[in-house]
Image (cartoon, grey):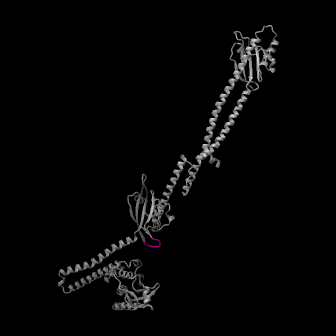
Amino acid sequence: MKVIRFFQSIQAKLIIIYVLLILIAMQLIAAYFYQTLDSHYKNEFRDSINSQATLIAGLVESQYLNEPKNSDTKNLSEELTYFVNSLFAPGNTEIQIIDAGGVVLSTSLEANKQIVNQKTTKTEVTRALQGIRDNDRMFTDVDNTRKFATAKPIGSGVRVLGAVYIVSSMEDLYKTMSSINRILIVATLIALAFTAGLGVILSGTITKPIKEITQQATAAAEGNFDQSVKVYGKDEISQLGHTFNFMMNRLKEAIFINEEEKEKLASILTNMNDGVVATDEAGQIILMNRRAMQILQVKEEQSAQRHISELLGLTREEIDQYVNGERNTTLIDVPLPDDEDVQTVRVTFTTIHRRGDGVTGAIAVLQDVTEQEKLEQSRREFVANVSHELRTPLTTIKSYLEALEDGAMEDKQLAPRFLSVTRNETERMIRLVTDLLHLSRLDSKQALLTKEQTDIADMLEEVADRFSFQLRQKSIRIRIVAEPGIRPVALDRDKIDQVLDNLVSNAIKYTPDEGAITIYARMAEGGQLEISVQDTGIGIPKKDQPRIFDRFYRVDKARSRNMGGTGLGLSIAREIVKAHGGAMSLESEPGSGTKVTFMLPVLPEEENAS
């Protein structure tokens, strides 16, 4: 694998390029040199043989072939052989002297003595006997010996006296050329080896900085920006190293700023009171902060790869309208776990646009507006209740006054009754307005508390005394139970009396004849005074108990109104207890009675003072 990776590297490619360039150059040079040298040696060899043939032809013509015809042929052959061998060192060369009839007169090669006095048919000889001087050829003999043959005519005149035929082996020449070829091959191999080594060194100067830049780029991709590339010079690669280091520094700063911004954004998203859900263009959730999970009652793994419509309980068509910006706000109800109640959530959508891509997603901001909706509902109910409570007595007063104006004033029996009803309705309106003003002062913290040390047992006894007449009328028994050890407590006596009066009054109203009412007082855990009023009346249905302290809320509206109540008594009582720093609660079973309890804190200095 390392070898494969090496040959895939730039360094190997550069080395291969260097080697190939040198190889091609050496091959071209060697081919040209070899071809030139081969042509030169062959031409020189040919010229040398031709010169010998011409020289021999001239000498033979002048000394032997011009002799008379009757001379001894045997002696002539011997003389010619001696002449040739003495003047020329044949070596691998055979020289033949041939007369005009094509008969071999002499040969310098002892092995071919049998051809003497025989007629030769060689083409070169035939052409030379015809007077043609350029008669040479190169051929390969039967023993695979490469040879050169030439024939020159003897005779300077018109008449050809004979021919000189020379055959010379070219093996020495070819051996020389082979040696030269081997030298060229060895030189090429040495040059290639030297080039490869030099290529390794030179390519290393190029690839080493590139490798370092690659390593630093890999380290940067893994998040390590602390190292820098070494710069070795001022060439283009060094400039690349400078630029890379500059880029790494800028990238490091950009990533640091980006991470800092991401941390800020994550901190903001985590600690926001509003939930945030981000989606892509398809509505798939890509981000959800902790508050959004709390509001939607989901866990992180439950939100992954889900469509926002599944979490919000909306259809995908509706979600597409919000993502595309056609709509931006809606209200949804999210059921609370283990509770019949629901929380109201306002969802505000903001589309995400990217230049050139259009809408790429949306951000949904979730706001828990349950309390706001409840307050708004309470406000609407309060306005409606106040309007209703005021309209009823005003309508009654108006109708009776109109009747009196129309003549009922003259009726001695109807006039007093109409005036009595008008007075009662007026008093009811006064009580209602008084209660509303009282609640308003309590809500705006304008009702000042005048605390004084109060004996709890005496306070409870006085309450029972104030309602003794109503109790006797309905034959209701009342019992005061104050545990021993209750010390005097600092409280606003008038306002607590108002709380107790309201609770006892309600107990009397909704307790049948011969029932019983019990007022308890004790010191609870945590240094708090606990006072409760319990009756044996009709009780309160379960569905009405959570709203029993709401303003104008009545379980039985008609009966409560007929009994003269305004529907604000328990609300005022709770506000008074809250102004003292306490709390009020209610326990009731339909048909078994009701128990209302309120807790008042006792300050440590009050205990010490007592």
Up the image or down, 279 lies above or below 545; here it is above
Residue 398, magenta (yes or no)? no
In the rendered image, residue 261, in percent from the top left (x then y), is placed at 46, 61
Q: Nearer the viewer, residue 247 or 82?
A: 82
- How many numbered badges does the structure rendering display? 0
In the image, is 251 to the left or to the right of 571?
A: right
Q: Residue furthest front?
A: 233
- Is residue 228 visible in the rendered image? The answer is yes
Q: Nearer the viewer, residue 94 or 591?
A: 94
- Locate the C terminus and report the quarter of the image it occupies: bottom left
Q: Nearer the viewer, residue 33 or 584?
A: 33
In the image, is 463 to the left or to the right of 202?
A: left
In the rendered image, residue 279, in percent from the top left (x then y), is placed at 45, 59
Up the image or down, 221 lies above or below 604; here it is above
In the rendered image, residue 330, in percent from the top left (x then y), is placed at 39, 64
Up the image or down, 422 lies above or below 172; here it is below
Up the image or down, 331 lies above or below 193; here it is below
In the rendered image, residue 607, in percent from the top left (x then y), is placed at 44, 88
In the image, is 156 to the left or to the right of 355?
A: right
For the record, the magenta segment spans 336-341
Question: Looking at the rendering, which quadrant does residue 566 occupy?
Answer: bottom left
- Is residue 589 visible in the rendered image? The answer is no
Q: Residue at x 63, y 45 (%)?
A: 200
Most frequent secondary structure within the magenta stretch: loop
Question: Looking at the rendering, which quadrant does residue 133 occupy?
Answer: top right
Q: Nearer the viewer, residue 537 or 195?
A: 195
Question: Looking at the rendering, which quadrant does residue 130 occupy?
Answer: top right
Q: Residue at x 76, y 17 (%)?
A: 96
